[in-house]
Amino acid sequence: MIRPSIDALSGFVDSARNVVLAVGLICIVVLPMHLPYSEVHWLEAILWACLAFYALEWALDISRWSKRDHFRERLLSFQHVIDILAVVPILAANLLGIPATTAWLLGAFWLLKLPAATSGFSLLGHVFLAEANSLMTVVKVFVFVLVMAAIAMHLVERDAQPAAFGTLVNSLYWAVTTLTTTGYGDIVPVTPLGRLIAGFVMISGLAVFGLWTGILATGFAAETRRRDFVRTWEFVAKVPFFKPLSPAAIIEIARMLRPIDVAERTVIVRKGRQGDCMYFIAEGLVEVAGAGVQLGSGAFFGEMALLGDGTRTATVTAVVPSTLLVLDLTDYRIFAAHYPDLAHAVEEEAARRRAERNKKPDISAEPGAAANRHATVDE
């Protein structure tokens, strides 16, 4: 009886997370305003309910981790740190008597609950580790230019502007604002040599930040490709149709395929539309409209649009949240050239579907099935 209750709570938390986040942030923003009936503290009541929700999520995470291996490592993970930041700082601020309008500002940590934020910080960490040497080299250049520019400006401008450049600290402040191309304008050189130095510092700032941007952009692109490839590899390995492939061939086909996640009741292909790709089902379940056919993991569909005139012959909808692997027309032709046996299996299945549709005019479906017989669906 306990396990179903925990599963039900976990399902509720997953489904309500985005709604609770949106409501909580809205309440934090409008809390300082004088809204109707604000004297009853109804906004604070909603915020306390949101906090209770995140406390429940924290408890469920600990309960789930305790039943798995590496429990201690989980407690030191970034996900656990996010759970703590979502609850503890707000509780501590309220216990210390900090005004509500200030204490609830700590609810900004709830933004870390967004899956994209967690994934983004994780990706950023990997990029910084991978590009640490290159980034540190640029940091050294930045510091060198910063210090040298401050010293040069201090020597050149201190007599003309003792209040602005009379100390090295003031010159460093100017160098930071100029090198970062912020340029507040509160401290500016007035001598010709000082302006020449300022122009050099501005150009150096553009170059340094251009290097940082290039390094980080390249690192992000490489890390994203690596993650996408690993994810695609895992999905390809689950599709029975690709079982006959060698590891080298799986690597090649994994580079061709791109995974997409579709929500429940999403229309994946629509009858009558032009199509230029086919789909393999890595996880989930889809339904062919009008044919009463459901396809599960390992099946494929949409191949007839690649082998015929490109027009979709059926509408296919996701029954449950599903993960699909998409093979575009150009990649399919490469796939057919490199793996004629598998391509022949696709064409045979398409021919069988076409023949069945001609025999049964009332059924219009274009799904294929995996090479393994258990994944083939008879309509």
Image (spheres, rainbow, N blue to C red):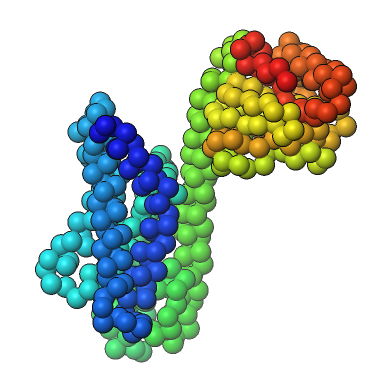
Q: Residue at x 56, y 41 (%)?
A: 264
Q: Quadrant of residue 194?
A: bottom left
Q: Quadrant of residue 366?
A: top right
Q: Residue at x 26, y 27 (%)?
A: 68
Q: Left or right: where does residue 75 sit relative to residue 297?
A: left
Q: Left or right: where does residue 358 sit relative to residue 144?
A: right
Q: Nearer the viewer, residue 149 or 219?
A: 219
Q: Nearer the viewer, residue 128 or 231?
A: 231
Outermost residue, left side: 96
Q: Position of residue 345 (x, y in %)?
A: 74, 13
Q: Left or right: where does residue 197 sit relative to residue 6?
A: right
Q: Nearer the viewer, residue 47 or 101?
A: 47
Q: Nearer the viewer, residue 128 or 202?
A: 128
Q: Residue at x 51, y 40 (%)?
A: 224
Q: Position of residue 300 (x, y in %)?
A: 67, 24
Q: Residue at x 36, y 70 (%)?
A: 27
- Can residue 276 be seen in the rendering of this structure? no
Rendered-image quadrant of the C terminus: top right
Q: Position of residue 274 (x, y in %)?
A: 82, 40
